[in-house]
Amino acid sequence: MVKEKKIGTVSNYFDHVKVAAIKLLAPLKVGDTVKITGGEVDFEQPVKSMQIQREKVEKAKKGDEIGIKVKKKVRKGYKVFKA
């Protein structure tokens, strides 16, 4: 089993568009798979697209705050790993 690397924390969640804002601790790119855990939530999903300040980007670096569509409701403080 590969140890997952924590790459960020959920900083916000926008219910109406099902988008999580994630403050990155490590680079992330479209095509990577992320795992989000916290509370009762624990799921993996591929990053199909991502935005920084509503601009579509292919990759983001440490320190960026990105928005990605998520398949489940998440909350501020949930941990994000690269799967």
Image: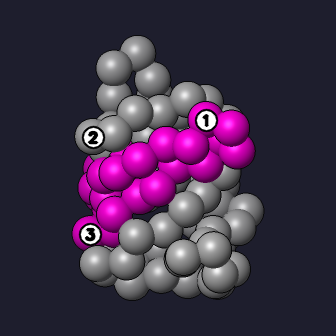
Q: Is residue 35 left or right of residue 24?
A: right
- Residue that carries the numbered disc 2 in the rendered image: 77
Q: x, y (%) of residue 8?
A: 32, 58
- Residue that carries the numbered disc 1 in the rendered image: 15
Tell me the crowding category of disc 1: few under 14, some 14 to 19, or many 20 or more residues within 10 angstroms, Cα based: few
Magenta stretch prevailing secondary structure: strand
Question: Distance from label 2 to label 1 (Cα)?
Answer: 16 Å
Picture disc at residue 25 = 3
Q: Residue at x 45, y 23 (%)?
A: 41
| 80 vs 1, nearest the viewer | 80
Q: Is residue 29 left or right of residue 41?
A: right
Q: Is 58 situated above or below 68?
A: below
Magenta stretch in the rendered image: 1-25
Q: Is 68 situated above or below 59?
A: above
Query: Which badge, 2 or 1, is on the more N-terminal residue?
Result: 1
Q: Secondary structure at mark 3?
A: loop
Question: Distance from label 1 to label 3 (Cα)?
Answer: 24 Å
